[in-house]
Image (tube, helix red, strand yellow):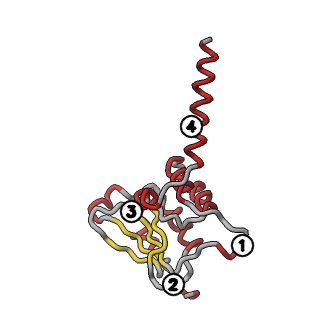
Amino acid sequence: MYYYAMGLVLLSAFFICFAQADQHLNTKQCENLGFTGLALCSDCHTFAEYIKDQELVSDCLKCCSEDSDDATSKVIYSGAILEVCMRKLVFYPEIVGFIEEEKDKFPTVKVHYAFNSPPKLIMLDDDGQLKETIRVDNWKREHIMQFLREKVKPLSDI
């Protein structure tokens, strides 16, 4: 009887987790998590290759838009703003390393210091308008560089 009850508990837990993984969050919930809902789900899978935080990847998948079959639908941005609180930089050595040593390789990426802001990339469209916000608290310098290489147009394309 004990094994039967444990089996039911585990089965129930599995179905609850499966149901939660498939749900989509509303716009406000996604914005609070640092996602705008404009990310493609394939971007979340790419994101998962760099970020090993399963909860964060799960949140991304709850806020993403399904990919279309059209290969040209990949979102590429004209620029980005790395927003961070200067006082909190001490807690983000990877972000500091990127700003001090790598940022100049990305002329369309600007750094903006905002009080109490967690580190985030604000992705911009051709008109310089915000299109997507991505938290980068746990990203390594290499991951930021790889993401920007893939998602931001080089200056020569603008």
> Circle 1 sits on which residue?
70
Q: How many marks?
A: 4
Front-lying residue, 125 or 149: 125
Q: Dot 1 lies on which element?
A: loop
Query: Badges 2 and 3: C-beta atoms under 8 Å apart?
Result: no
- Give x and y (percent) for residue 74: 64, 72
Cα distance between the residues tagged 3 and 1: 32 Å
Please tell me whether mark 2 or mark 3 is closer to you in this view: 2
Q: Residues within 10 Å of mark 2 (few under 14, many from 20)?
A: few
Say if 65 sits above or below 105 in the image: above
Residue occupying the point 73% across, 68% down: 69
> Circle 3 sits on which residue?
119
Q: Dot 2 lies on which element?
A: loop
Amino acid type at image mark 1: Asp
Which of pointers 1 and 4 lies earlier in the amino acid sequence?
Answer: 4
Q: Dot 4 lies on which element?
A: helix
- For this orientation, the residue located farthest to the top is 1
Say if 128 sits above or below 89 in the image: below
> Circle 2 sits on which residue?
126
Please tell me whether mark 1 or mark 4 is closer to you in this view: 4
Which of pointers 1 and 2 lies earlier in the amino acid sequence?
Answer: 1
Which of pointers 4 and 3 lies earlier in the amino acid sequence?
Answer: 4
Residue occupying the point 52% across, 63% down: 142
Amino acid type at image mark 3: Pro
